[in-house]
Image: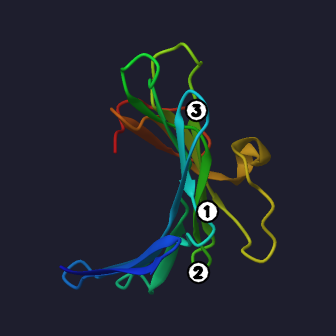
Amino acid sequence: MSYVTEQTSHHPPVSAWWFECAEKGISGYGFDQISANFTGTRVRIAPGEHNKGIFLTLHKHNNEEYQFTHPTAHLGGLLKGSFAITVADVCYVTCPQSGLKVIMEYVEEGWLGKAKNLMKGVILRYDPNNDNRLKIKDVKDDEVVGRVEGSWHEQIHFTLGSKSFDKSVRI
């Protein structure tokens, strides 16, 4: 495995990185910048304007390149002294070559509730030149190739097609 990273800008701080695992036939790169601000009761950490996401290439699979976007996270519990990280956003994985897209929604718990770190997502076929589906509710059941659901802190369940979840299948 080879890995190289460099801070390419100090104001704003932006890092670029690249990795390759020739044995597995994968490589990846990314441009990361985060933006953090205090919202009163927690710290919001989001991708900055120079953040391009993560790009992963599967060389043994027709050089398919998948782009992953970053969700927004929050550091809460500042007032109570019990710090917890939650993610409450939508992120995407797209591959124009395969025509596959994943819409992943992270579910935010109530303000007083304990973090459950829930997420759910759909895998669908999409047209990279005409893509307007940004939320799971925008996807019709007959377009669903697979579903994922669970707690990103514990277990994530996967099922093919639009059928309901079989909790015995785990990833």
Q: Disc number at residue 107?
A: 3
Picture coordinates of residue 103, whole percent (x, y): 62, 52
Image x and y of residue 28, in percent: 38, 78
Considering only vertical position in the picture, is 101 above or below 13?
above
The numbered dot on residue 101 is 1
- Is tag 3's residue or tag 1's residue first in the polypeptide sequence? 1
Image depth: mark 3 or mark 1 in front: 3
Residue 147 in view of the camera? no
* Amino acid marked by disc 3: Val
Pick whichever, 166 or 93, lies toward us. 93
Q: Amino acid at mark 1?
A: Lys
In depth, the one of 15 and 119 nearer the eye is 15
As helix, strand or loop, the secondary structure at mark 2 comes to loop
Q: CA distance from mark 3 to mark 1?
A: 19 Å
Alpha-carbon span between mark 1 and mark 2: 11 Å
Mark 2 Cα-neighbour bin, 10 Å: few <14, some 14–19, many ≥20: few
Q: Quadrant of residue 7?
A: bottom left
Compared across the picture, whether 168 is left or right of 136 comes to left
Residue type, label 2: Gln
* Along the viewing direction, whichever of 81 and 152 lies nearer the viewer: 81
Few, some or many C-alpha atoms within 10 Å of disc 3 (few <14, some 14-19, many ≥20)? Answer: some
